[in-house]
Amino acid sequence: MTWLGNSQNLVTCGFSKLSERQYGIWDTRDMSKPLVLKKLDDYAGIPYPFFDDDLNVLYVAGKGETAVSFF
């Protein structure tokens, strides 16, 4: 989990019931359901989110992986 800059939102990364990596964006004022819940890929490694405040870019990478997703 990481905060998305100065917004009231945070991002979580994890796995779906089908073992697909996914990320979710949540509004901290209403955590009953995510604003966005999307599949990343089918890699096995644990996804780690990193947010760059200066560029407003979210990077998601897994330990030991050569690919990095950015949003």
Image: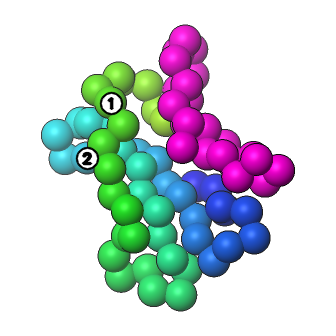
Which residue corresponds to the image point at 65% horizontal and 61% vertical from the top-left?
4
Inspect this view and state whether residue 15 appears: no
The residue type indicated by label 1 comes to Asp
Does 52 sit left or right of 57 as displayed? Answer: right
- Mark 2: which amino acid? Ser
Residue at the right extreme, as displayed: 54
Q: Which mark is residue 71?
A: none
Which element is circle 1 on? strand
Label 1, on which residue?
41
Q: Residue drawn 82% across and 50% down?
A: 54
Q: Which numbered disc flags the more N-terminal residue, 2 or 1?
A: 2
**Viewer-nearest residue: 62 or 35:** 35
User: Marks 2 and 1, Cα distance to the nearest angstrom?
Assistant: 11 Å
Q: Residue furthest left?
A: 18
Quarter of the picture holding the C terminus:
top right
- From which residue to which does the magenta span run? 49-71
Residue that badge 2 annotates: 16
Q: Judging from the image, what secondary structure is the residue with disc 2 in?
A: loop
